[in-house]
Amino acid sequence: MTTTTDWPAGWTARERVETVALDRDAADDPAEIADEAGVDVATARAVLAGLAEDYSDTRWVDDE
């Protein structure tokens, strides 16, 4: 992967990691995601864990 260095000014680590993870359609390798997002691996893992928790509570209309 190529590290992205042109993130919009003010974007947080969470925004960068989330963007990379969602663009890749899989959050399977925190090290690769960290590299692409320009953050350390521990930060990427923490953000991915937070995203997993956030999305675990999502209810879809067809789930009812």
Image (spheres, rainbow, N blue to C red):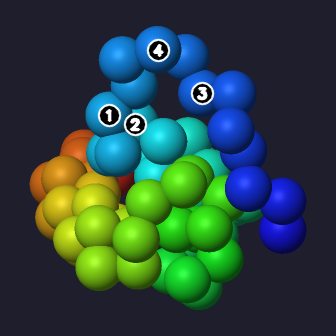
At a point 19% along the width and 62% down the height, the residue shown is 50
Report the residue marked by disc 3: 7
Report the residue marked by disc 4: 9
Separation (CA) of disc 1 from disc 2: 5 Å
Residue 52 shows in this picture: no
**Do the CB atoms of the residues marked 4 and 1 lie less than 8 Å apart?**
no
Q: Quadrant of the N terminus?
A: bottom right
Which of the 4 image quarters holds residue 62?
top left
Separation (CA) of disc 4 from disc 1: 9 Å
Task: Name the residue type under label 2.
Answer: Glu
Separation (CA) of disc 2 from disc 4: 11 Å
Task: Name the residue type under label 1.
Answer: Thr
**Do the CB atoms of the residues marked 1 and 2 lie less than 8 Å apart?**
yes
Which residue is most to the right? 1
Foreground mark, 2 or 4, reads 4
Question: Measured from the top left, where is residue 19 in percent x and y?
Answer: 56, 41
Residue 4 shows in this picture: yes
